[in-house]
Amino acid sequence: MAQTPIQTSHHKHLAQGTLIGLVSTVGMGLVNLVLRRHWALTLAPADFGWFYINYTVLFFTAILIDLGGANYSTIAISKEHAAGDTEAVSHIFFSTALYKVLSGVMGTIGFWILAPWLATHFFHQEEAVDAIRLMAFFFPLFCLEGHLFAVLCSFRAFVVGYGMLLLKFMLMLMVALRCGPSIRVPPLLFIGGSGLFCLLAMSYIVGSGRVDMHLRYFSLQGVGRYLIRGLWLAIFNISAQTVLYVDQLVATMLLGATAMAVYSVAVPIVMILYALLIILPTVSIPVIAAMWGEGDSEPAIAKLCSDFVNAMLALLWLALLVTVPFGNRIIALLFSEQFVAAGALLPYLAAGMILYISGYFCFNAWNAKQRNHTTSLIMLFGPLINVGLCLWLIPKYGLRGAAIAVCCTHAVMGIAGFVLLKVKMPSFGLAPSRALYISGCGVGLLSLSLWAGPVERLVSRSAGMAISAILLYLTLIAPMILPRLIRAAR
């Protein structure tokens, strides 16, 4: 089916945003990896494990009080901006920002009060009270930062948004490398980095004329309107983000912050994969929202989703071909032999993340039509399944049990996303013959890698067979995936 000029324009915006995000995220991923490696090797294991779990707690809390703001502001501002309604854009922007700041301040007060209890009963590290209270000041800035980045994506200012994030992390790394191994350094750097991002982003948004600065937009009425309209997106957003981090929270409660140092080494590698893959669902929200508004665009949206899902299926087997034989070597090269136990977690976490992104893209494609009830109700089951599996598997298998729970949960949610689109959009399909071919190649070559055994030395027979399997897989799969992705980008 030939694309209309408007659909071609939307695909170009999607391709441009994805490319910009990809380049920036590679840079941010490398910077974050060096930053986390620096702290893993210089901080005490207990302090390193504590900081990143504490960051996860703050992130999780920010999701709970977000109430769908990230997705709501992205979709609503995108539509009002396309219609040229600056007043509506300004109202949504400032009322949402006001809620973010107020809820962030309340969160800071809550963390300050609960710091002794969290240090003793959650982190199992009583001396961390002062550090928790210091980290609490990061919370309002963190909440506002997420809103500002979503708004920049709404305006399709992808270069500005991702560029500011990259600048933030580069400055943090430069300062961290010059500071000593103190547990106070990471919280202070995150406070300063988020503060700089908020200042630059607010200056750009207001200075570019996309919003009008006026006191009438800072209203409780605006906040109330935001809460009501974002209710279903709140349920979806809270559930979608909770399912990503709840395994770390449950594992910390069961095993303690010190044991989580190994898990905190495996997670950033997978989060680099997440950061790379989440770009397309992020930049696609305003684009697909505009496509839904044009009418008779369902076939084009269904084809876009189908091509993305098949690409993720191909990536799933590639990730397993890399992480199963090379997991230990990846950890040793990026961190040190001290954390090599994290290598066994990588296949589960990487596969789970790819399945999650696949389902998340499908859910967001339907959310962009502002039909959030079904996706929200489905996504609610994700955290419940994850918690249940973690409580069952972690006592039996430790950190590996947490990784298995994540993989199984994301597989369920990915399948749910495919089924939802098939029911709601009859033109959506997974191309069974193509999916079967991709999976057949993946299973066959992964079996070869498993037979060769794990790679302990890069110059060895098992390493040669694993690399050969990866190259052969890429050769067999490329003709099935690349032409469709190139046509979609055009």
Image (spheres, rainbow, N blue to C red):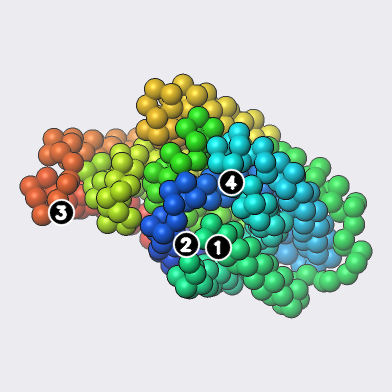
Q: In which quarter of the image is the C terminus?
A: bottom left
Can you see residue 194? no
Where in the figure is residue 489, as x and y percent of width and height?
A: 44, 62
**Sooner in the amino-acid sequence: mark 4 or mark 3:** 4
Can you see residue 231? yes
Identity of the residue drawn at 50% across and 29% down? 254
| Element type at mark 2 | loop
In this rendering, position of residue 342 left or right of residue 446:
right
Calculate the distance from the C-alpha at mark 4 to the C-alpha at mark 3. Answer: 42 Å
**Sooner in the amino-acid sequence: mark 4 or mark 1:** 4
| Element type at mark 3 | loop
**Residue beneath label 2, please?**
181
Question: Which residue is nearer to you in this view: 365 or 159?
Answer: 159
**Residue beneath label 3, please?**
458
**Residue beneath label 1, please?**
185
Where in the figure is residue 75, as x and y percent of width and height?
A: 68, 54
- How many residues crowd around disc 3 within 10 Å: few (fewer than 14), some, or many (20 or more)? few
* Image quadrant in which you'd find residue 487: bottom left
Identity of the residue drawn at 87% across and 62% down? 217
Do the residues bearing badges 2 and 1 touch, measured as CB atoms within 8 Å? yes
Front disc: 3 or 1:
1
In this rendering, position of residue 355 left or right of residue 301:
left
Where in the figure is residue 199, as x and y percent of width and height?
A: 69, 71
Q: In this view, does 3 lie above or below 199?
A: above
Amino acid at dot 1: Val
